[in-house]
Amino acid sequence: MNEQFEYIVKQISRVVLGKESQARLALTCLFAGGHLLIEDLPGIGKTTLAKVLAKCLGLQFQRLQFTSDMLPGDILGVSIFDQQTGAFHFHRGPIFTQVLLADEINRATPKTQSALLEAMEEGQVTFEGKTRTLEQPFFVIATQNPLEYAGTFPLPESQMDRFLMRIELGYPGRSAEKSILQGRDPQMILEEMTACMQDGEVCEIQKKIDSVHTSDAFVDYLQAVLHFTRTANHFHVGLSPRAGLALSRAARSWACLHGRDYTIPEDLQQVLPWVVGHRLRSAEDRMEIPRKQLMDIFSEIPVPL
Amino acid sequence: MSEERKYTPALTMALIVAVFPHTLQLPLWIIAWCIGLWGYLLASLRFGWPRPNRPVRIVLALIGIAGLLATFSTRLGPEAYIGLLAVMAALKPFESSTHRDRMITVFIAYFIIISSLLQTETFTITLYMFFSVFVTTAALVRINNPYGGYRSDLKRAGILLGKAIPLMIILFLLFPRMQGSLFGMRQAGQARSGFSGQLSPGSISSLVKNDEAAFRAEFKGRIPPPEQLYWRGVVFSRLDNGSWHRPERVPERSEPLQGQNPVDYTISIEPHNDQWIFALDVPARAPTRWSTFYRDFTIQSRRTISRKRRYEMRSYPGQKPGKSDWGVDAARRLPKEGNPRTRELAAQLSKGADNASQIVDRGLKYLGDGEFAYTLNPPLLGDDPMDEFLFESRRGYCEHYASAFAYLMRAAGVPARIVGGYLGGERNPFAGYLVIRQSDAHAWVEVWYPEAGWNRVDPTLMVAPARLNQGAQGALPPGELSGGFAGKYLGPVQSLIEQVQWGWDALSLQWEAWFHGYSREEQQALLEKLGIYWRSWKGMSAALLFGLGLVAGITGLYAVLQFRRPRARKDPVSKYYEKFCRKLARAGPARPAGMGPKDYAAFAADRRPDLREEVKTITDLYIRMRYGGDTNTETLTHFKNRVHKFKPGQK
């Protein structure tokens, strides 16, 4: 597992240079069966990362650029009257795929957003009274631009919660940027790339992650973290049990991808800032807490021996 | 409304429980006031009746204060103070909409509980105080945590009070003992004992119906026979306007009395708001530093006895007071005029008598032969009370006999004085101590013989010999003391009730011995044993610091134990890993609390590359067992051995 994972990470790093740790987190999130929110400025490589992830995992890929005039039907599909058969025929929307890149999700109206988010949560689409199950695995990688607020509909906190992780890419390092500037067009590499995984392998790995052992000691630590967020005065509202489950799943995924069939506190520490970053607000100004500060806060929580 | 329903019943309950012991002292209207207001409050919660708004509450408060002023006017004693608390406590739950109000209500309840101490300190009240503190604490828990049930409130209150017990014991042992009563106030329920500085007809018979204990005596050895159970209290030797007085100045007796067959005993005296100290006739010395032994063989406390006290005594019950001739002159004095017939009788008695004792015997014989009656209801006496009593009514209680006999003896030239105190006492069948009740109050006479000194004579016994063995109740004519009504109707239940009463009495005495026995003197002795000398301010602050230190120490210890408790349950894996971390911390970096084991291994290996392998092995073993679910005992043994052998050098 570990080797395969490292290989995928390496493949991704060929296209998205210098973003190895983000690639690891993104994979962890996807294998944990969670949806990923990438938040960063335009041109940093969000879309490329999403594409390369889909390609590496050998999954179907659909890209959807969100706009403010988009309707739920544009995502889920529409029924069109077929004159020959005299009946309505359902045309599947872009959501019927395995990896959906929802670009600039915050540009769509809340109604459209919630159509997507419901599908994410349920794994199925109900349209005109008929429920259609989405193919498994199904991932949504959504991106949003944190700086552009004009004409956007920021996701409410309850919907942010649907994303297992939220990561940022950030500017590439100096040497990575040099390679980007000197090297080949990443799009070219992407096209040449072959899938690292076969059909059904992703589901197998997901099953394996489900069976990762979480010991009492680990759950104690996880509970200490949850308790801390609920009692310490740093946060406006503490983490919910759903957030606790998300943490556990992300940590198990991380452990599995790093070749262990049990979780250790370090797994939790690795995923923690990315899992809770969009779920916690500062008690002072109800704003999000900067990543660095968040990590400092959590490093105070003692690991039970 | 629902908000209130969570708190108000609990608060009202706490107040009811706190005020309850005061109901006997409070005026009736205040009790009615409390019941009415609380009843209305609880009913309004139940049925949604309107609640008085602010103006109405102010008017009610003013009415309450007016009532208090009308009842107590300017007598600002403890009763007035408790009355004020009760009146306001009845109103307070009506304005408990904020947390602050509720907290104040709880503190009022605590305050009312403390004020019980102004009244009494009996065992029963003390037990009840524990109960009411418990209830009030439960109310305090409730207002701070309204979501638990009543059971959890009570449980938490119990836990809190349980934790407070060590603190209570330390404060009991070390808090400076106050001499006198709390807040320097006289205790309420004053003057229960009728003994005052004077003795006049009716002053003792008024006590007979009072069944309350005056004091209790625990004897070290056997209880002396009934004829020796004369408890000496006051000596009256100055006759003035028909009543007998204690002389204004009695000199102090410096040396203790010597004698044979001493009897040692401990007396627990009930507060009587006077200074008398009672002791078996004849006492040997003053029992404590806070009392004085006088030359008339009486003892007085320097302070008013306004709370229960215990003192150890020694007496020579078989002995006469002896040759001390102090007070003989005073014991001869008679008014120039009055009671001519008594003087005449005295002249007859003394005519031809060889010595004083013959006169005394003749006098006693006169009483014994003269159809005198022992009664609680003598007729009122006029201007020549001795004449009327001795020759006309011939009915009286012990003070009549004692005073008439002393007068007679003085008129006959024998120095005589009256001693007031108690006679007899009832033995507790369970604990074997004597209870001396107010109804045992008695007066007798001491006469002075030139050759033998003071000699006790009890003229009452000439009339009612049963007084000695059966107490006042046995000696009085049937029906005069209506105490025995229960015996007639309740039969066997009566004896059961008596048994319970005696048992409770014995328990209370034991409690008092323990609680009140720990006096200031005992405290000083304890502190001196601990090397703390009380009297200097240094010693005092040292004692307080010591006490506070002890409290802080115990609290700290408790906190440590609390903190360590999860560790105590830890399995060997954690224990050995902790050991490993300690060893590694001495040699390399310590583990930051928030760092996991794997990160710590890497962190330590960075600083101590030489230990990399060993640290990694041990950490991997630990992780396998702790997180990987490896429960193999061999792994554990291996791990233990590795930790044991792990010997990192110095940094």
Image (tube, helix red, strand yellow):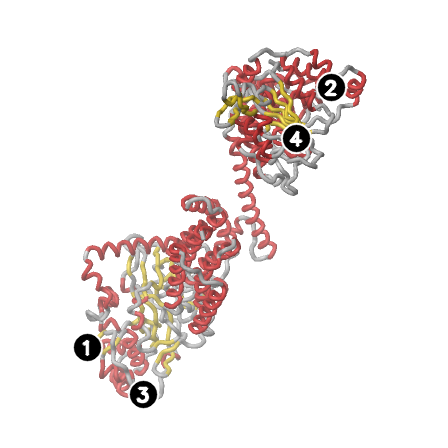
Instruction: Kindly identify the residue that appears in the image at 64 percent across and 41 percent down.
Output: A286
Q: Which chain carries label 1?
A: B
Position of B71 relative to A85 (above/below):
below
Asked if marks 1 and 2 fall on the same chain, the answer is no
- Mark 3 to mark 1 CA distance (whole Å): 24 Å
In the rendered image, which residue does mark 1 sit on? B369
Circle 1: is it few (<14), some (14-19), or many (20+) Cα within 10 Å? few
Circle 4: is it few (<14), some (14-19), or many (20+) Cα within 10 Å? some
The quadrant the C terminus of chain A occupies is top right
Q: Where is residue A142 in the image (x, y as percent from the top left)?
A: 64, 27
Instruction: Kindly identify the residue that appears in the image at 68 percent across and 26 percent down.
Output: B589
Helix, strand or loop at label 1? It is helix
Helix, strand or loop at label 3? It is loop
Q: Which chain carries label 3?
A: B
Q: Where is residue B486 in the image (x, y as percent from the top left)?
A: 22, 62
Q: Determine whether, in the image, residue B481 is placed left or right of residue B579.
A: left
Which label number is shown at residue B80?
A: none
- Mark 1 to mark 2 CA distance (whole Å): 133 Å
**The quarter of the displayed image where residue A40 is located:** top right
Determine if residue B52 is in view. Answer: yes
The residue under label 1 is which amino acid type? Answer: Asp
- Mark 2 to mark 3 CA distance (whole Å): 132 Å
In the rendered image, which residue does mark 3 sit on? B338
Q: Do the residues labelled 2 and 4 touch (CB within 8 Å)?
A: no
The residue under label 2 is which amino acid type? Answer: Leu
In the rendered image, which residue does mark 4 sit on? A67
Q: Where is residue B181 in the image (x, y as percent from the top left)?
A: 47, 63
Foreground label between 4 and 3: 4
In the rendered image, which residue does mark 2 sit on? A17
Q: Which chain carries label 4?
A: A
